[in-house]
Structures are given as C-alpha cells and as structure tokens.
C-alpha cells in the first residue's frame, strides 16, 4: 500500500471507529514528586500513535505535524504544577531520538479559551518543548506554591512536529507526565506563561539574523512589557542546534542565561550516513551531536507593571552542526525563553475569567507563513 493510501485508510478508521479524541490517549498513575502532603497527583499520558512517513516520501520528506484539537488533560478545575515531554515509538516505551533517526522538532500546547500574554489575539501558548525534552516544574522542587490553573472546560490544542530520517514510515507517541493539585489549592499563586521570542511577540519581527550567517546573535526587536506585578519564577528556553547561549534582560539588566549541552547521552548523537544506520564503522566525523539539554533559570526576578523583557540568542553553526530541514535547507533558528510569572491567586483568577477565546486560525496562518 502506498503511503497516501495508508493515511487515507487510517483517517477513515480513526474518524469512524477510533475517533481521535480524549479516549484514544492512555493514562497511567504514577507517584507525585512534590506537595504529596497537599494531595498532589501525577499521571503519564500517552498521546498518539502518529504515523510519521518515510524520509523518502516526496510530499513530506518525513516531516509532518500531528494535532489533537482537544488533548486529554490530567485533570479539570485544578492546578497543573509541572510536566515533562518525551517522544517515543509506538510501544510508548522506547525513546525516539536522533540515534534512531527520529526527531521531535517541537511539541506545543495552547489553551484555546485564554489569550496569549505576548500576542494578545492568539490563544495562550501554554507550553513548548523540543528534542531537548525539558521538564517543567512550577513548584521549583516543592519550594514554591505555584501552578497553572486549568478550568473545567478549557480546550487544549496539542501540536507535534516530528521528523523521520529513516526510509521506513514509523509510528511515534508523545508521552507526557503531568503533576497537579485537584481544585484550587489555598495559598498557591497562579502561573501565567509568557512567550519571549527573538522573532517578536507575534512572530512577525526580524531577529536580525541572516539566513547565510553561521555565527550571529539574534535579538528581539521590541521585547515584552509586563502589565502586572508578580514573581518571574521560572524561565524555560527552547533553541535549535547551533545555539551556544541565550540571555534574558529585564530593563536592560541580564536576569537569566541559558547554556545548551550537546550529545550528553547516546540518544542525542546521530550517525550521518543515510540508509538504515547499520553495517558501517563510525568515526567521530560521522557523528552529529545534538542539543540534549538547556539550563533553565529559577526565581528570576520581581516584576512590576512596565518591566520590559528582551532576549538575545547566540548561534555558532561552525562549532555545532545545525539541523537540516526536510528539504535539505538549514532549519530556521529559534530563540524562545518561556517565562512563567506567578501572580496572587485572587487577581489571577479574576483575569483568567475575563479572558476571551484566542484566534487559533490567526496563529496557524502566521506559523505557516514562516513566522514560526
Ligand atoms: Cu524549535
């Protein structure tokens, strides 16, 4: 069966017999890590499987976007206190990474019933992750009472960009661990995510980087200005191969610096020869070391209305081989620092209740147009 036929076939099956909705995800209960005394719970949710076509497929070159319009959440009317993201193969257990020629370009979560702090007509960008698979903990290992308030009817959009660099089409799953507290826990601040990006608040500005440059510093042109007081408790970066340093500034003063690690475990080292990856010796030059971690910043700053945040992202693609996109061109760079502002519960809830739905079509149109 040709690939298109497989997709068509699966599409029909999923549409009629196995609708791709909450019930297709798998949930397992695991032990909570923080605030167990307050009733914290932790679950693992497996999203998918998603079929990623062959690298030789002419239409996609092995890169597709998979989406859940109403992704299963771990809880409703609750505070999410942290989450992790991993790309695995169909069994939900085996890690899918560069050494196995499968790549998580990004996964992203958007709350469609809230509006984005940085681009106010879009739905709220709630989370982002890449192949580095950062874990996010709003409680800072149980030292901070803070969480993301998820309402009973919030619809969360999940998007997954995975890339297959092998000739065989393969299924992947996105495995997330979520930790949460049921209800509205007393004394917990509310976390508001803020997407600070070298490409601007609505991804519509130049970062100053030129496509032909190998060594450069990309910068946000306007930055993001706070409207509320709070504590900037956590900054989580997302960058691409080639990055060497990313910095966040508050009113011109450096408040966070993130450094990526490359190829820290074998999973993040790919073999450069094409084919199936078997039957040849590997010299050092035949390996590429990919971003395997990037440092986060905790307890970053006190924020007041009018505080202005800017970002710089340094790339050195002479030292670190950049990712190639599916068509062989260099993948666009990314320089994102996902800021998390903790605000007092009562005023946070009041603001959330006043939010309108975001415009998902406007976001998708911008990203498709190359702004993402
Ligand atoms: Cu990315």
Image (cartoon, grey):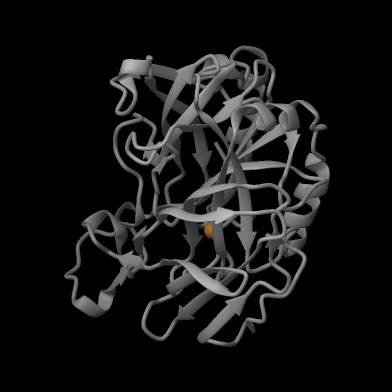
Q: In this orientation, does residue 57 appear?
A: no
Residue 354 percent across, percent down from the top left: 80, 29
Q: In this orientation, does residue 190 appear?
A: yes
- x 32%, y 38%: residue: 141
Left or right? Give the position of 269 relative to 157: left
- The image shows residue 162, relative to residue 115, as above or below, that is below
Displayed-image quarter of ligand 1: bottom right
- The image shows residue 152, relative to residue 199, as above or below, that is above
Q: Quadrant of residue 99?
A: bottom left
- x 53%, y 47%: residue: 231
Residue 350 percent across, percent down from the top left: 73, 27
- x 62%, y 59%: residue: 196
- x 77%, y 65%: residue: 204
Q: Nearer the viewer, residue 289 or 195?
A: 195
Q: Nearer the viewer, residue 308 or 149?
A: 308
Q: Nearer the viewer, residue 238 or 224?
A: 224
Residue 90 percent across, percent down from the top left: 39, 32
Q: Quadrant of residue 181?
A: top left
| Count of residue discs | 0
Quadrant where the C terminus sits is bottom right
- The image shows residue 200, relative to residue 102, as above or below, that is below
Residue 301 percent across, percent down from the top left: 50, 56
Left or right? Give the position of 92 relative to 356: left
Quadrant where the N terminus sits is top right
Q: Quadrant of residue 18?
A: top right
């Amino acid at each position: 069966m040709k690939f298109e036929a497989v997709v068509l076939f699966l599409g029909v099956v999923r549409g009629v017999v196995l609708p791709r909705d909450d019930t297709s995800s798998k949930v397992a209960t695991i032990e909570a890590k923080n605030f167990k005394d307050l009733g914290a719970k932790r679950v693992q949710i497996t999203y998918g499987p998603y079929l990623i076509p062959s690298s030789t497929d002419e239409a996609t070159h092995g890169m597709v976007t998979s989406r859940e319009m109403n992704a299963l959440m771990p809880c409703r009317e609750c505070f999410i206190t942290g989450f992790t993201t991993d790309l695995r193969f169909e069994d939900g257990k085996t890690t899918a990474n560069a050494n196995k020629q499968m790549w998580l370009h990004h996964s992203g979560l958007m709350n469609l019933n809230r509006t984005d702090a940085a681009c106010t007509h879009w739905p709220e960008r709630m989370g982002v992750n890449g192949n580095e698979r950062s874990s996010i903990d709003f409680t800072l290992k149980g030292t901070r009472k803070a969480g993301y308030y998820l309402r009973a009817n919030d619809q969360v959009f999940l998007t997954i960009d995975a890339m297959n660099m092998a000739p065989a089409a393969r299924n992947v799953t996105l495995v997330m661990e979520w930790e949460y507290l049921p209800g509205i826990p007393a004394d917990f601040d509310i976390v508001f995510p803020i997407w600070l990006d070298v490409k601007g608040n609505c991804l519509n500005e130049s970062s100053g980087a030129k496509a032909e440059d190998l060594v450069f510093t990309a910068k946000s042109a306007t930055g993001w200005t706070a409207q509320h007081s709070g504590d900037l408790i956590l900054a989580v970066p997302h960058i691409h191969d080639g990055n060497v340093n990313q910095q966040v500034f508050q009113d011109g003063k450096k408040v966070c610096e993130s450094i990526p690690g490359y190829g820290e475990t074998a999973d993040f080292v790919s073999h450069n020869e094409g084919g199936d990856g078997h039957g040849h010796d590997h010299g050092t030059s035949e390996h590429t070391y990919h971003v395997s971690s990037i440092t986060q910043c905790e307890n970053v700053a006190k924020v007041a209305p009018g505080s202005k945040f800017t970002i710089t992202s340094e790339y050195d693609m002479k030292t670190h081989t950049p990712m190639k996109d599916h068509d062989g061109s260099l993948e666009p760079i990314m320089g994102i620092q996902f800021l998390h502002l903790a605000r007092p519960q009562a005023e946070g809830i009041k603001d959330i209740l006043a939010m309108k739905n975001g415009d998902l079509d406007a976001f998708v149109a911008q990203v498709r147009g190359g702004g993402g």
